Every structure is written in structure tokens, then in C-alpha cells.
Amino acid sequence: MVSNNRKVGVIGTGVIGNGWIARFLAKGYNVVAFDPAEGAEMRTRTLLKRIWPTLEDLGVSKDASIDKLQFVNTIKEAAEEAEYVQENVPEREALKKQVLEEIDKHLKPTGIIGSSTSGITATTLQEGLRHPERLIVAHPFNPVYILPLVEVVGGERTDKAVIDKAKALFEAMDMKPLVIHQEIEGHVADRLMEALWREALHIVNDGIATTDEVDRAITYGAGLRWALMGPFMTFHMAGGDAGMRHMLEQFGPALKLPWTKLVAPELTEELKERVIEGCENSGQGKTVAELEEKRNEFLVKQLALVSDYWPLFNKTE
Ligand SMILES: NC(=O)c1ccc[n+]([C@@H]2O[C@H](COP(=O)([O-])OP(=O)(O)OC[C@H]3O[C@@H](n4cnc5c(N)ncnc54)[C@H](O)[C@@H]3O)[C@@H](O)[C@H]2O)c1
């Protein structure tokens, strides 16, 4: 377990920033946070209170405490004494660059900056920084305080030692950093999810299935396998005794059929309404916070299963 007096900064405390705050606090860090939105601090503290039992189930370090969180009024205060700063502002390039420049201005030279960006490359975000060599993309998954994956991507000017240090930091926080060696918009995981998301929107837009039916098609089928295996091992096992070799012979030709569209449909008002109404119906009047509680309960159990079984199907390093 990590026991420390170390300090990190978190800039932008929405869905993802709050997830990082929870994970850092659970590992005993002092967290200094900044978000200009009215009520941001209250929102974070309410969430922390609600999810702390979940964090305890997952294992918090001896010196972990919600009291180690401090909200400040400027990026300068959040960055100046930190060893690591995580940026989580909305996905707009100009805004991110402005915020990152401000962090860079006040962070000590040995400090590292991670951006949660889902799609922008580190090379783009490095433009204009005093110390571009200490910027990485550290792309997490919601809820950050439960899901271990973080994609770590350096830009053209990132120092390799910074990637190694960030990887070690995330491992010490019980995360599973995936270092991606070649930059691409959307990194790896979001490109995969985006392909499925676009197809799901087409299916709903074309009236082929409802949002609920699409969700069922995943939950009771592929979704159950995906917790343990990605697309490659899943298809290896779909090929019978000869595994992937047979799978490719049998289903390879189908890849040429025009089954998937991939180019996103137009987000018309009608499609938006259909999707929103579908999700609200599936939620059966429960608030997102109520759904979140049950999802967390499920993920904690599932994570334990994955830890037990995953090494049987995948190399551990
Ligand atoms: N939501 C997800 O599932 C998810 C997953 C992985 C990564 N991300 C990435 O994380 C980042 C944040 O996404 P989110 O979903 O948390 O968004 P969000 O809208 O929930 O939160 C953004 C927060 O940034 C704050 N903010 C705006 N301007 C700011 C500024 N100048 N300084 C500091 N804070 C400011 C807002 O007040 C808000 O609280 C994005 O880059 C997104 O692509 C999101």
C-alpha cells in the first residue's frame, strides 16, 4: 500500500476530474483541485461521500482521507507544489491548450502533466508549452476510481523517462497503464468504442432496433465475454480447436461484406430524442446517481473476477 504526503493537482472537476480525485485520495495523496464552475466543490464532496464505501471495498491506503482534498481559486495554487497535475477540462483544443500553458507556467520543472483528453494527441497539446517534455496523455475510463485502465501516450517532444515515471505512478495506484507507442487521435480504446457507438446510432436511426434492444444485444452476449477477453482472444475461441486460424478461414471473407457503416449518422433532433428517451425509459425513473451506485457495486464484483481469470487468457506483461 502507498503511504504518502505527496501532492497532486487536479484541474477540472467534472465526471473525470472527480474520478481522478477519488482515486488519488484513496491512495493517500494530498489533492489540490481547481474548477471555476459554481458549486464544483460541493459536487465533488457529495460524490466522494457517496462513493467512499466503494473505495474502501476496493482497498484504500492507511493514510487515505477525504480531508486531504483542498479546493483552490487558481490553477497556479493547484499546480505550484504538485509533483503531478491531471488536466480534465472539456474536450476543446483551445481551452485545453490555455489551461495546460497555465499549469506549465507554475508547475516545478520535475512535475509531470497528464491530460485526460479522449481524442487530442499529446503532440498537439505540447505546442506552446515551456516544458513540453513533461506532458503526456493519461486517458482514463469512467468511473476512474474503479476502472484500472489508463492509456499513456507521449508526444513527439515527451521525454521517455516521463512516460516511465507516469507508468510507475499509475501502477502504484492500482491502475493498469497501457503505454501506446504511436500517437493517433482517439488513442486505442476510444477508437474501438467509437466504432461500436457509431454502428449503434445507425441501428437506432434506421429503426432496426431500439436503444434498449441494442444494449441487450451487448449485455447478454459480447459484453459478458469482453470483461475477460478483447476481440482477438474472443475470436480465437470462436474458431473451435484450431482457434484463430480456423476463425479467419471461416469468417475472413465476411469482412468484405458491407455490414458496418462506421461513418457516423447525422445527429438529427429526431435521433437525439429517440436515444435520450430510450435511455430514460431504460433507467425507469432512477437518477444517474442511483444507477451509478448499482453499476459500481457490479463493477467491484466483476473486477475481482477479472483479476482471478484474466491471467489465464492473457500474458500478464
Ligand atoms: N466522460 C468520459 O467518459 C471521459 C472518459 C475519458 C476521458 N474523458 C475526457 O476528460 C475530459 C473531461 O471530460 P468530463 O467528461 O469530465 O467533462 P465534464 O464536462 O464533466 O467536466 C469538465 C469540467 O471542467 C471544468 N472547466 C471548464 N473550464 C475550466 C477551466 N478553465 N479550468 C478548470 N476547469 C474548467 C468544468 O467546470 C467542468 O466541471 C475531456 O477531455 C474528456 O474527453 C472523458
Image (cartoon, rainbow, N blue to C red):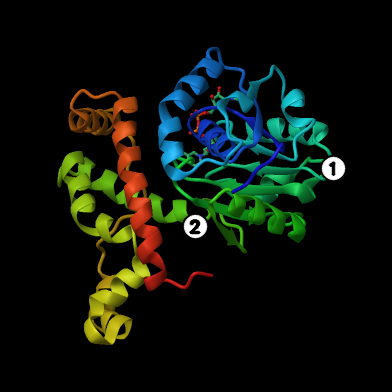
**Image quarter (top left, top right, bottom left or bottom right) of the C terminus:** bottom right
Q: Regarding mark 1 in the picture, which secondary structure is present there?
A: loop
Relative to 268, is 191 on the left or the right? right
Relative to 312, is 213 on the left or the right? left
Residue type marked 2: Val
- Residue at 30% of width from left, 43% of height from top? 298
Looking at the image, which is closer to me, 95 or 189? 189
**Dot 1 beta carbon under 8 Å from ligand 1:** no
Q: Quadrant of residue 75?
A: top right
Looking at the image, which is closer to me, 256 or 74? 74
> Residue 291, position in %: x, y?
29, 31
Q: Is residue 22 visible?
A: yes
Instruction: Give the CA separation, mark 1 to mark 2.
Output: 30 Å
> Residue 121, position in %: x, y?
62, 49
- Residue at 46% of width from left, 55% of height from top? 189
Looking at the image, which is closer to me, 169 or 271? 169
Q: Quadrant of residue 159?
A: bottom right
> Residue 270, position in %: x, y?
24, 30
> Residue 145, position in %: x, y?
48, 40
Q: Which residue is mark 1?
A: 109
- Residue at 75% of width from left, 35% of height from top? 82
Q: How busy is the neighbourhood of tag 2: few (under 14 within 10 Å), some, or many (20 plus)?
A: some
Residue type marked 1: Pro
Q: How busy is the neighbourhood of tag 1: few (under 14 within 10 Å), some, or many (20 plus)?
A: few
Give the vertical position of 264 relative to 258 (above or below). Answer: above
Which numbered dot is residue 188? 2
Give the vertical position of 167 relative to 58 (above or below). Answer: below
- The earlier-in-sequence mark between 1 and 2 is 1
Which numbered dot is residue 305? none
Q: Is residue 121 visible?
A: no
